[in-house]
Image: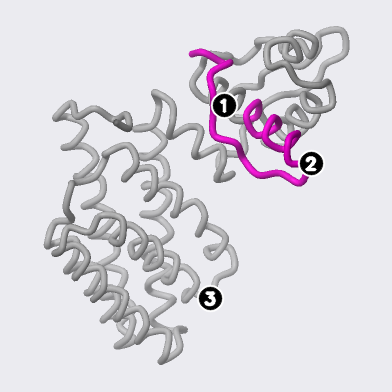
Amino acid sequence: MDLTSPGVAAPVQAAPAEAGLHGRVLDHLGTAICGGELAAGAVLNIDELVDRYAVSRSVIREVLRVLASMGFIETRRRVGVLIRPARDWNVFDPQVIRWRLASAGRIAQLRSITELRTAVEPHAAWLAAHRISHDDASDLVGLAAKMWAAGKAGDDQRFLSLDIEFHCGVLRASGNEMFVKLQDLVAEVLTGRHHYHLMPRHPHEEALQRHAAVAQAIQRGDGDGARRAMVQIMEHAFDEMSSIWEQNLNPHPA
């Protein structure tokens, strides 16, 4: 991996020029760590990073502070800045998920998140059926209808946006503050599947029907029906990822 190639800048609270430098360096180092180019136990030298990226020490220190907050690095006396193993990372951080999806381990990351979603979203749907307001339930049914239209029309970008809105809406409607905090995670994994071509070019009709079934069951107050339909959505997602991967489709963006 070329750690000096241009990257995507992440917005931070700093002067515009420095913010761009900070984002570029953070993106490169984060992706390198997630991809294994910078392995656990490796030592980062601040002066070498200053030279490599042609930035100030203050930029490097801020980048390292952010990486430390994510559990990526630690500073040890007489050793320096040390890369920590993956088990220490904050795997719920959306930026960490984004970097992991950009690495060779993206399938393992997608599987891990989908397993988490399978544990959470069906129960969120069950709760939503008992807690959602009448207006919000109507909106959810409307979202499912819009997803159906976008899917049938082959409008992939609109379908992705609506899919994210739908699943985040179910999490919010659950009324569980912990579930609600998973919205960014769900958005990242759905965006990642689309970006890396790990979903069908057009949604299957069964998937469209199941989203409608979730929304309608929630509107009826049928928690068990909502839960069953959401489990089917998660199982279908697993099947889609497995079949697409087995076809050896190129997972990288064109």
Mark with earlier residue (2, 3): 2
Secondary element under disc 1, as helix, strand or loop, is: helix
Q: CA distance from mark 2 to mark 3?
A: 39 Å
Instruction: Write the start and end of the magenta stretch as one range.
Output: 1-26
Quarter of the image holding residue 58?
A: top right
Quarter of the image holding residue 106?
A: top left
Q: Determine whether, in the image, residue 172 is placed left or right of residue 237.
A: right
> Image height check: is 228 above or below 102?
below
- Residue 137 rendering spot, x and y as whole percentages: 37, 84
- Residue 184 rendering spot, x and y as whole percentages: 52, 55
What residue lies at 69% left-to-right and 30% top-to-bottom? 21
Q: Give the numbered dot on residue 173.
A: none
Assess disc 1: are there few (<14), some (14-19) or many (≥20) residues with their C-alpha within 10 Å of its C-alpha.
some
Q: Which residue is mark 2?
A: 15
- 22 in magenta: yes
Q: Which residue is mark 3?
A: 175
Q: Which residue is mark 1?
A: 86
Asked which colour scheme the image uses, the reply is: one colour
What residue lies at 70% left-to-right and 32% top-to-bottom? 22
Mark with earlier residue (3, 1): 1
